[in-house]
Image (tube, grey):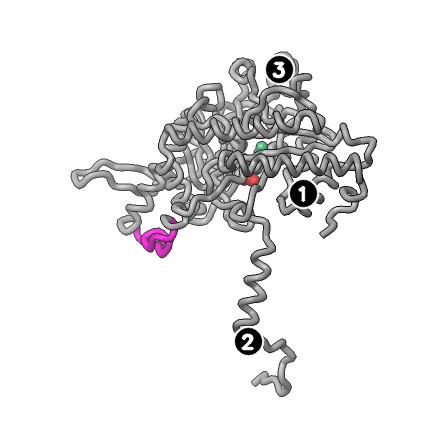
């Protein structure tokens, strides 16, 4: 036998020392349960604890993915209902919960667009993408062998029909639009832009990452979007990042339904009431994207969130998110440069331009915020704003919490003028 004859030199620790070590380290994390998490475009809203309680119900938490459908009726009904709710909120016809994140939802969406054009015998090679887009948009298009054509935003930070019309041709498979866009601005011309792309035989992909701003108010499906993804870990309060996994359901209009990933969840009416089953019979499907059903625990959390808010609560959540972002912008407008000074939706974008003569940059401001105990906002994105500082407070924050955060940014601006080394030397603690 391969028996070791000397003792392995492992550190010997008591249980209490190990527990204290890891518990102490866990308090060094930045988390939404410790404070404001203003990462723009990420919608780091509070994750309600009722979601966690529901996801831990033994019927969900201990279900085995290979147990027979007859024993999974509760889960299948929940998933089917969540699909219907997401379709209702977005104005889409069908939804698949499979994709593991927004990026995979985009990938699925562009694969469906490609399959649609191929079925029609069309060889389209280009996808139009605004210059404010998130990097996953061109990545999803490129992974489907499309050439990405950048569409410049207007001086007001949004897309204009003329720019889209100028780029439109028989080669264009689709346009990918984020609404509101990553400057936090509502794409006012989206309906007209959708018409232009549809008239040219293309389809419209909606990046739903910013859906939080329009919940219960405007539906992508009513604005001409043919296919979109949802980020359950953004809009629907399921945990993010280290607390993940994510979930990025994809929704389509009926024209793209034949290409959805398999399996779909079917509902049959029987004498004993509704029965749910997996439906693999979709000959033109783009295939399977994820093991088993997708990230199931996230479905339970998102479903709980939707049911606990209800339609009025969802709308209120968008209204509060928009109010909070505009409040932050109004209080910071004089101290920080605002590249596109328009009323915003759920987030606002500032820059370091006014501080140029002090030598303080966006990166310094972000690090100084950490000294004050804040997770920094998104920095240097969107790419069209030099030194961007992108703040998304979400609806979760109280007025007092927002004021504390804004006061801190104002204090950092004063430091930058009076004592810039404090800021350029951050972190100081
Ligand atoms: C977050 C985000 C994505 C990608 O979503 P993931 O869930 O992180 O993969 C795409 N577009 C925008 C605008 C985003 O903010």
Is residue 178 in view? yes
Is residue 103 in view? no
Asked whether the residues under the numbered discs 3 and 2 touch, taking CB atoms below 8 Å apart as contact, a structural biologist would say: no
Residue extent of the magenta highlight: 55-68
At label 3, counting other C-alpha atoms closer than 10 Å, the crowd grade (few under 14, some 14-19, many 20 or more) is many
Q: Within the magenta stretch, is there residue 300? A: no
Cα–Cα span, label 1 and label 3: 36 Å
User: In front here: 224 or 214?
Assistant: 214
Measured as percent of width and height from the top left, residue 78 is found at 33, 42
Cα–Cα span, label 3 and label 2: 65 Å
Measuring 55% from the left and 45% from the top, which residue is drawn there? 35
Locate residue 300 relative to residue 422 in the image: left or right. Answer: left
Q: Name the residue under label 2.
A: 14
Question: Mark 3: which secondary structure?
Answer: loop
Per the picture, the main secondary structure of the magenta-coloured stretch is loop
Measuring 51% from the left and 36% from the top, which residue is drawn there? 398
- Foreground label between 1 and 3: 1
Q: In this view, does 177 lie above or below 54?
A: above
Q: Name the residue under label 3.
A: 160
Measuring 55% from the left and 76% from the top, which residue is drawn there? 14
Measured as percent of width and height from the top left, residue 172 is found at 60, 21
At label 2, counting other C-alpha atoms closer than 10 Å, the crowd grade (few under 14, some 14-19, many 20 or more) is few
Question: Mark 1: which secondary structure?
Answer: helix
């Amino acid at each position: 036998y391969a028996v070791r004859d000397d003792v392995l030199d492992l550190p010997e620790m008591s249980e209490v020392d190990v527990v204290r070590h890891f518990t102490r380290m866990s308090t060094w994390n930045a988390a939404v349960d410790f404070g404001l998490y203003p990462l723009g475009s990420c919608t780091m809203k509070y994750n309600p604890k009722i979601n966690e309680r529901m996801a831990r119900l033994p019927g969900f938490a201990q279900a085995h993915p290979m147990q027979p459908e007859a024993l999974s009726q509760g889960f299948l009904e929940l998933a089917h209902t969540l699909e219907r709710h997401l379709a209702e909120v977005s104005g889409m016809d069908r939804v698949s919960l499979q994709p593991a994140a927004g990026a995979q939802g985009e990938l699925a969406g562009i694969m469906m667009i490609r399959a649609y054009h191929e079925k029609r015998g069309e060889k389209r090679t280009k996808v139009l993408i605004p210059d404010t887009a998130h990097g996953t948009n061109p990545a999803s298009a490129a992974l489907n062998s499309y050439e990405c054509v950048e569409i410049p935003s207007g001086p007001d930070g949004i897309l204009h029909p003329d720019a889209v019309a100028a780029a439109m041709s028989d080669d264009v498979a689709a346009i990918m639009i984020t609404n509101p866009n990553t400057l936090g601005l509502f794409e006012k011309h989206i309906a007209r832009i959708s018409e232009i792309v549809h008239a040219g035989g293309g389809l419209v992909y909606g990046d739903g990452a910013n859906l939080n701003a329009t919940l219960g108010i405007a539906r992508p499906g009513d604005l001409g979007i043919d296919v979109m993804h949802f980020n359950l870990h953004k809009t629907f309060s399921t945990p993010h990042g280290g607390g993940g996994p994510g979930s990025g359901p994809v929704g389509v209009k009926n024209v793209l339904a034949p290409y959805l990933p398999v399996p779909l969840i079917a509902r049959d009416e029987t004498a004993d009431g509704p029965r749910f089953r997996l439906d693999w019979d979709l000959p033109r499907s783009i295939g399977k994207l994820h093991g088993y059903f997708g990230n199931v625990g996230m479905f339970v959390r998102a479903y709980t969130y939707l049911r606990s808010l209800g339609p009025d609560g969802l709308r209120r959540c968008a209204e509060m998110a928009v109010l909070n972002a505009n409040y932050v912008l109004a209080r910071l407008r004089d101290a920080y440069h605002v590249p596109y000074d328009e009323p915003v939706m759920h987030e606002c974008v500032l820059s370091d331009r006014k501080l140029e003569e002090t030598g303080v940059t966006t990166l310094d401001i972000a690090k100084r915020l950490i000294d004050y105990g804040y997770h920094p906002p998104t920095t240097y994105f969107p790419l069209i704003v030099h030194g961007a500082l992108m703040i998304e407070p979400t609806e979760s924050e109280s007025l007092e919490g927002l004021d504390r955060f804004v006061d801190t940014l104002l204090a950092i601006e004063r430091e930058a003028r009076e004592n810039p080394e404090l800021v350029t030397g951050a972190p100081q603690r």
